[in-house]
Amino acid sequence: MTHKRNIEELTETVQNSLDEKKYVQVRETLLDLEPFDIAYIMEDLPEDTIPVVFRLLPKELAAEVFVELEADSQEKLIRGFSRAELKEVLDELYLDDAVDIIEEMPANVVKRILATADPETRRDINNILQYPEDSTGSIMTTEYLDVKENMTVGDALKKIRRVGHDMETISVIYVLDRDRHLIGFVPLRTLLLAEEDETMDEIMDTNIISASTLDDQEQTARKFEKYDFLAMPVVDKENRLVGIVTIDDALDVLVEETTEDIERMAAITPSYKPYLSTGIMETVKSRLPWLMLLMVSATFTGQIISSFEDALASVTILTAYIPMLMDTGGNAGSQASVTIIRGISLDEISMKDIGKVVWKEMRVAVTVGAVLALLNFGKLMLVDRMIFHNPITVWVAAVICLTLVCTVFAAKLVGCTLPIIAKRMGFDPAVMASPFITTIVDAISLLIYFRFATALLHI
Amino acid sequence: MTHKRNIEELTETVQNSLDEKKYVQVRETLLDLEPFDIAYIMEDLPEDTIPVVFRLLPKELAAEVFVELEADSQEKLIRGFSRAELKEVLDELYLDDAVDIIEEMPANVVKRILATADPETRRDINNILQYPEDSTGSIMTTEYLDVKENMTVGDALKKIRRVGHDMETISVIYVLDRDRHLIGFVPLRTLLLAEEDETMDEIMDTNIISASTLDDQEQTARKFEKYDFLAMPVVDKENRLVGIVTIDDALDVLVEETTEDIERMAAITPSYKPYLSTGIMETVKSRLPWLMLLMVSATFTGQIISSFEDALASVTILTAYIPMLMDTGGNAGSQASVTIIRGISLDEISMKDIGKVVWKEMRVAVTVGAVLALLNFGKLMLVDRMIFHNPITVWVAAVICLTLVCTVFAAKLVGCTLPIIAKRMGFDPAVMASPFITTIVDAISLLIYFRFATALLHI
């Protein structure tokens, strides 16, 4: 029973057995584990022992472990495989897993894989590979179970027993007409609970929600969240069934797309690789261009300050409140933009809601801005003036607090509209998060600050 | 066939039919749709028509739609239900859905629900309600299918046909010994492919991965991502089966927890409600406290500037580069912190990796900082000095660029360590994202800036 396990301990056990060349023991330790855990342990072993351990596993399990390994380990294994070994692994893989692996590999490795695969698999793989990256076609599998409309429950169960071994999922069976048009589906559960002699068209559900091969994969994955499916059929333009997407792949897409959003929101180019296995230069490449871009745009903020140098020189205390105003503006704007970006991702907010969104953010901004300004006024007069002895007059405090209200208002407005506009223009709204909003709001808040300062302090 | 539909158009059709009191038409339009879509349409209808539409639906579908409605619509419906109606809906609900609904309702509505439920359901609901919020127990259902170890395949299939209707999922069947200890499981697919007279202990898989009732729900949900399960058994301390978690609930947990993380990262208290149905005051409450806290901490930054007022007054051009240094530092820190926070969420990074993480970020920081500083030096001398005629000497440029290198280094270091430390101390690492990192890095970058300025410019 492996129900409470400590992977770190197991890794050590395997390591020790390997050192002592007790291969039977290694095999036995690993046999009890899930493929994901075996892969995790293997990644932690010295590189040259990975092929050894891999060959100790029974071939079906080996294939499942192979899927869970990271791309560079997979590549190393493939390069080292004999032709027979590669074919064995390929034959055991589910089609969509094979496609996933091929997508990660360099061209010469792909050539080797395709040369080894049998003609039918090769055709299917090539078919799926033709769908654009991020399309539903690219994540589907063609290993589904289909039946004709006039088949009986008894015959369908027989067919399942006959071919079910090779199918990735048989939780749902698809009903096709003579021309392979998808006309209904039967959950396995319904099939089991039906009478032997009922036919498919009597028990099938015709309220089909399907995806099209060219639909965006994230859009398809979000449907799983809404509709609680275990699998979703994928059809071509003529509504002919070409594949299915299973919930485990949809889950992976959702996690991957969310990570992508989060990384974009922090001004990072998404990498799709676990942090610890990304190289230094790769990490630098995903971060540096954004920092450069944002650094250049911060120049404008600097120029605004330069042009008000005289005002700042005559009332030097104004400089001390620049960080507070810029930060509060940036934070207020990020709150709005991140909320809207997530709402767009989750399909809760669309273009048509822009009016509602702006109206709501305006009211929130006025409330938040007013409270912050009042608190700040009190703090300026009581703490900063009396305790820190900063040279703050009522007019200086007024300039700071009025700027605060206007900055929060502008920040919320910019923060809630830019993601929606980006989406409308076909960009990823996630780019319009903290870093960009902050840069824009910085400039706005400084302009407001100096306007109020020159007007109220007569400088 | 509803396969390509336009929900907005359908909402209008339903609205029009309602206005003309053509209820049969309304019913027919809705009958073809998925529960999620019907709920979506209902939320968009005038409030007083919701109960009308709800009563038009067949009772099983009505219950499924009820689950998909937002909490306030559910509450309104429950308050308006007759006792018989409430009982009908309750009887049709899956147990875990009923529990979810009850968790959202005010106490008097809960009382009404529990009073109407039959004694067995009431007992189960109360059982699940006792598990802490966010625990695995709180998302599990007790409607699973279990069999004894010596039962034959034929008998198991008979049992499924007999009781399968009431089970939320029958994709996996659990095998228990005499004392209800979980000893194995049989995927429905295996059961179908097995011989009639084989017994459960012959075909069951004993490599069980289970959750415990008190495990964190996110932790349990992440296991679905790793292991591609459709359902996971939940056991008590004695390894007795008490319930199962199904993949659709795990998916909901993952989406909800991710939204929570994203909101925390933007300094918002998570709300769990769709943006457009959150009230103004609720939104203000989730954002204002964080802005206040961050505003107060920005005061320190202001005090640093105040204390270097003389330095700034003698070389006024230094002020103009404060925003660029603060922003770049903030952005560099956010990139590191957000990457680490996501890595922690996805279980890719744990406490033991802190050394590797710091070492990696240090090397990234030196590379990024050096490139940014060089570029910036060129820009300062060529653009800012020659084109904008800012009074920049080589020494001023050196101060700015050295500060940039040190700030990026400090920012990456703070950004990558704080989330791990927060996690270690039992806090949510997501709080250690942009806003907090920015505030800390602001102060650090200013201190570095003024140190270099006083040292190199002799002020």
Image (cartoon, coloured by chain):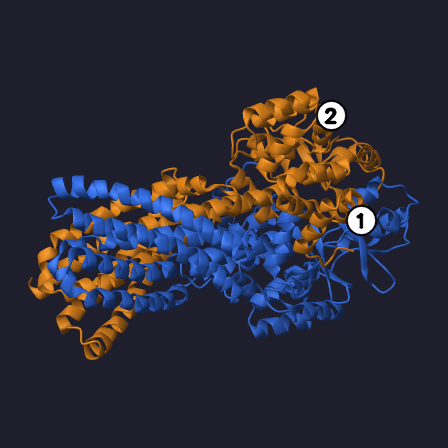
Chain colours: A orange, B blue
Residue A31 or A427: which is nearer the viewer? A31
Q: Amino acid at mark 1?
A: Asp
- Picture coordinates of residue B28 (x, y %)? 60, 45
Real-space Cα separation, disc 2 to disc 1, in angstroms: 29 Å
When the figure is inspected, residue A201 is found, relative to residue B284, above or below; the finding is above
SS assignment at label 2: helix
Residue furthest to the front: A20
Residue B255 or B376: which is nearer the viewer? B376
Residue furthest to the right: B197
Q: Is residue A194 left or right of residue A14?
A: right
Q: Could you classify mark 1 by the number of other residues whose Cα lies within 10 Å: few (under 14), some (14-19), or many (20 or more)? A: some
- Picture coordinates of residue A211 (x, y %)? 57, 36
At x 49%, y 49%, the residue is A346
Picture quarter with the N terminus of chain B: top right
Residue B120 or B84: which is nearer the viewer? B120
When the figure is inspected, residue B328 is found, relative to residue A426, above or below; the finding is below
Residue B328 or B232: which is nearer the viewer? B328
At x 88%, y 55%, the residue is B149
Kindly identify which residue carries mark 1: B205
Mark 2 in CB contact with mark 1 (< 8 angstroms):
no
Picture quarter with the C terminus of chain B: bottom left
- Picture coordinates of residue A110 (x, y %)? 59, 25
* Chain ID, mark 1: B
Q: Could you classify mark 2 by the number of other residues whose Cα lies within 10 Å: few (under 14), some (14-19), or many (20 or more)? A: few
- Picture coordinates of residue B311 (x, y %)? 15, 62
* Chain ID, mark 2: A
Q: Is residue A51 left or right of residue A425?
A: right
Kindly identify which residue carries mark 2: A84
At x 50%, y 44%, the residue is A257
Q: Amino acid at mark 2?
A: Ala
